[in-house]
Amino acid sequence: MGLKNYLIITILLTGNPLLAQEIISPKFGKGLFNLVGKDSTWTMKVGARMQFLTTNSWDINGNGDFEKAESSFLVRRARLKFGGYALSPKLTYKIELGLSNRDMSGTSQYTSNAPRYILDAVVKWNFYKNFTLWAGQAKLPGNRERVISSGNIQFVDRSILDKHFNINRDIGLQLRHHFNLSEKFLIRDMFSISQGEGRNITIGNLGGHQYTARVELLPFGKFTEKGDYIGSDIKREQTPKLSFAATYNFNDKAVKTKGSQGTYMENDSKEGFFETNINTIFIDTMFKYKGVSFMGEYANRDTNRATAINTDGTPTGDSVQEGSSVNLQAGYLCKSNWEVAGRYTTVTFSGNGYTTNQYTLGVSKYIVGHKLKVQSDFSYETIDNNTSGLLYRLQFDIHF
């Protein structure tokens, strides 16, 4: 064996640092790795998160007997996240991609029949003092439960209030601002104008735009590490913290059953869609103190014309989901990082007049906060006291 070949084999076997280097990553839960430009004019933090869910459900008939049992295993969420700044820390960005089937669902002719990979793609410019302009696709300043990341919620999944009334993500502009009334009393105000069709729409605006305004009052100051948008009192606030907020959303000439969400209301008009104006109101609060947490939300949606019709006045079969909902939930986080939480949600639709009540008991073990946790919950649901069902869920969550 020649000297040259001997040296090559020796380098490969000894793992010479000239060929391989250990990559130092941030602390667990703070991203996979951070990139910084050579001249420090840009940064990028890369992260990943996954949720694995198992579900069991049972219907209960009028005699109190169990029937129609179902079970499933699911990769509920699998996502990649990128964020940092460009040129200046005042110009930041966020990109979040959803890779699971649930994340990409909702393909249609209005999204070019393509998977909806993009969740967030937004640039944020702090252009003057406490004013920040957002441009791109992101969550609107809607109900608190929706704005809380699905990886930071208190139960396995969000409530049925959020399921039926949230305004979720859209493409457009947002202006955000904050100021102090006193040393502690903080006020945040937000306004957005967006396309009104939801995320990843590729064929343009079908009806009018939607406009959203939100105000938040924090009389006792900021929560620790943005805890007003994290489920559970993970940081165990040492002084009481309270946030009270209200949101108003107006979707002009909406063509979907839930404004920017739901299904399209097609008809035989020249435009091809039934158009109506939809108003949505949210009122919510968050309280935390020494492991105790409480969140309450109220939602209401109404419209000037709820039933979709054709040009001759005949109903198309679609209608706006008008109604209201209340969600109340509370929990206590023990020092061992086990938490017990309860939730009550009621939803009433005015169009068909039925009411759904759901009662949920949840138990969570936070191993590394919300970054590594196991959550389980059990729900009992009734519809107009005529039909009912049980739902059990178990979920494992990991964030890098």
Image: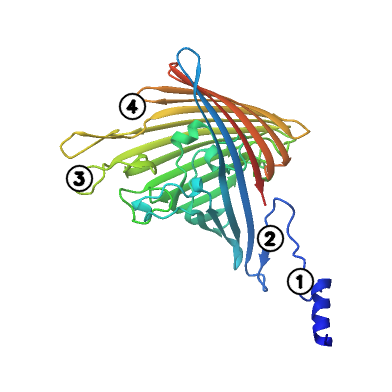
Please tell me how crowded label 3 is: few (under 14), some (14-19), or many (20+) other residues with Cα within 10 Å. Answer: few
Residue at the limit of the structure toward the front, as seen here: 1
Residue 213: in sight, yes or no? yes
Toward the viewer: 209 or 214?
A: 209
Q: Against 274, is 335 above or below?
A: above
- Dots 2, 1 in contact, CB < 8 A: no
Q: Is mark 1 on a helix, strand or loop?
A: loop
Image position, residue 197 (x, y; %):
38, 48
Q: Earlier along the polypeptide chain: callout 3 or callout 2?
A: 2
Q: Which of marks 2 and 4 is nearer the N terminus?
A: 2
Residue under numbered circle 2: 33
Q: Distance between the residues labelled 4 and 3?
A: 23 Å
Task: Say which of marks 2 and 1 sits in front.
Answer: 1
Q: Distance between the residues labelled 3 and 2?
A: 53 Å
Q: Who comes first in sequence, dot 1 or dot 3?
A: 1
Q: Which residue is drawn at 48% across and 46% down?
A: 140
Q: How far apart are the two marked residues, 4 and 1, measured between alpha carbons?
A: 65 Å
Q: Nearer the viewer, mark 1 or mark 3?
A: 1
In the image, is 243 to the left or to the right of 174? right
For the point 80% across and 83% down, the residue is: 5
Q: Position of residue 36 (x, y in %)?
A: 67, 67
Instruction: Give the mark, 2 or 1, whose residue is nearer the N terminus.
Output: 1
Q: What residue type is labelled 1?
A: Ala
Of marks 4 and 3, which one's residue comes earlier in the chain? 3
Disc 2 versus disc 4: distance between alpha carbons? 50 Å
Q: Which mark is residue 20?
A: 1
Residue 351, labelled with which disc?
A: 4
Q: Name the residue under label 3.
A: 269
144 lies above or below 42: above
